[in-house]
């Protein structure tokens, strides 16, 4: 029996972008969807319109003062929300609320059981901190999802898996001391790429020591390198016995991305999603939510995200 998969797609989700010519431009979602239709995958998923979230959801993770600052700069459209990577633009608050809202509506569907597998292409904004934007990320939707699982749905153990080329520092440090958040992050070595974090000796602090697995890879790491480290990642997740799995499927770890140096193929993303769906079926009543994450070569992100989608449909 095919597991129902829900995909969030629409112009409102594409509003979260920083203009034509920017790596995180408005054409990313269309590149993904054009390939989805080309492969005929749109006929095998439930396509849902983007959904707005409310401010209460944002403050499960973010400081209220920071949320208020984003709202104010969304009106003026002036300045930066961090130190130079993440510019404000008119309506940025509403745009990011469509990302978070789509995630949260998908999460609710997964928890209810109607759609155990969810994919949100413009999502996975893993650099934002609780009180600041960073690296094209205004609000940390992954962090909000984790807090929602814990606070609203009383899920005890959440697994967050990140295969974006950049270390998911905004998620990692927010939950570094939380033993119930299992993190596996495979990324380009921070000595060579922003944000310069995620070293192998960062395994959690205090009671959470040993609940986080950072796997930094050298520039040029390819599918052979991925296949060598994935079994360790999968066993780590299995030992963590999660109740829900989140995947940040950033496509900037694929060869040819304009701002990173890794060399995975889209098949690495498909393999990750396939194995995580198996783990979700074993431990999480099938529940998994995947977020598109980074990826700035449009062909790469279209192929990689659709490999994830195919794995979820299978």
Image (spheres, rainbow, N blue to C red):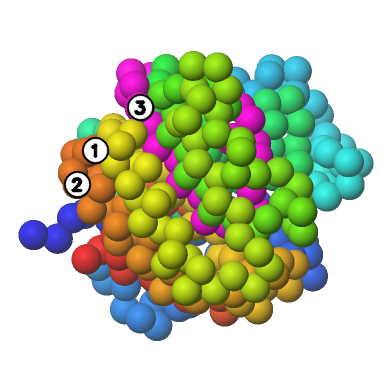
**Element assignment for label 2:** helix
Depth check, front residue: 28 or 15: 28
Which residue is rendered at x = 65% and y = 36% of the image?
A: 170
Whether residue 49 is visible, yes or no, is no
Query: Do the CB atoms of the residues marked 1 and 3 lie less than 8 Å apart?
Result: no
Q: Is residue 209 left or right of residue 180?
A: right
State the residue position of label 2.
281
Q: CA distance from mark 1 to mark 2?
A: 6 Å
Mark 2 crowd level (few <14, some 14–19, many ≥20, 10 Å Cα)? some
Q: Is residue 237 left or right of residue 229?
A: left
Mark 3 crowd level (few <14, some 14–19, many ≥20, 10 Å Cα)? many
Depth check, front residue: 286 or 98: 286
Query: Do the CB atoms of the residues marked 1 and 2 lie less than 8 Å apart?
Result: yes
Q: Is residue 25 left or right of residue 30?
A: right
Which residues are the magenta region?
A: 152-175
In the rendered view, tell whether residue 88 sits above or below residue 207: below
In the drawing, what numbered circle is on residue 284?
1
**Element assignment for label 3:** loop
Sequence-wise first label, 3 or 2: 3
Image coords of residue 104 (percent x, y): 43, 36
State the residue position of label 3.
157
Sequence-wise first label, 1 or 3: 3
Q: Is residue 160 magenta?
A: yes
Which residue is rendered at x = 69% and y = 17% of the image?
A: 64
Depth check, front residue: 294 or 165: 165
Image coords of residue 92 (percent x, y): 72, 43
Which quarter of the rendered picture does the C terminus lie within?
bottom left
Q: CA distance from mark 3 to mark 2?
A: 15 Å
Q: Is residue 250 magenta?
A: no
Whether residue 183 is visible, yes or no, is yes
**Element assignment for label 1:** loop
């Amino acid at each position: 029996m095919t597991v129902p998969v829900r995909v969030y797609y629409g112009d409102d989700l594409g509003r979260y972008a920083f203009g034509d010519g920017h790596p995180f431009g408005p054409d990313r979602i269309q590149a993904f969807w054009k390939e989805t239709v080309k492969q005929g995958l749109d006929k095998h998923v439930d396509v849902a319109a983007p959904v707005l979230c409310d401010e209460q959801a944002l403050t499960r993770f973010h400081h209220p003062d920071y949320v208020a600052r984003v709202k104010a700069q969304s009106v003026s459209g002036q300045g930066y929300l961090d130190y130079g990577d993440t510019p404000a633009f008119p309506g940025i608050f509403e745009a990011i609320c469509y990302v978070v809202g789509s995630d949260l509506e998908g999460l609710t569907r997964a928890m209810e059981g109607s759609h155990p597998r969810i994919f949100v292409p413009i999502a996975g904004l893993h650099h934002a901190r609780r009180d600041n934007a960073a690296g094209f990320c205004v609000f940390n939707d992954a962090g909000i999802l984790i807090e929602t699982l814990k606070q609203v749905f009383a899920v005890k153990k959440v697994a967050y898996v990140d295969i974006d080329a950049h270390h998911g520092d905004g998620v990692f440090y927010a939950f570094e001391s939380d033993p119930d958040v299992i993190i596996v992050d495979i990324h380009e070595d921070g000595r060579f790429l922003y944000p310069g974090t995620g070293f192998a000796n960062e395994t959690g602090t205090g009671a959470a020591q040993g609940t986080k697995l950072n796997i930094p890879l050298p520039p040029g790491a390819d599918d052979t390198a991925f296949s060598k480290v994935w079994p360790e990642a999968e066993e780590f997740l299995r030992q963590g016995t999660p109740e829900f799995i989140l995947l940040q499927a950033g496509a900037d770890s694929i060869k040819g991305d304009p701002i990173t140096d890794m060399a995975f193929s889209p098949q690495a993303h498909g393999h990750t999603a396939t194995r995580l769906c198996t783990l979700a079926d074993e431990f999480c009543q099938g529940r998994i939510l995947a977020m598109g994450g980074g990826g700035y070569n449009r062909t790469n992100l279209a192929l990689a995200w659709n490999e994830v989608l195919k794995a979820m449909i299978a």
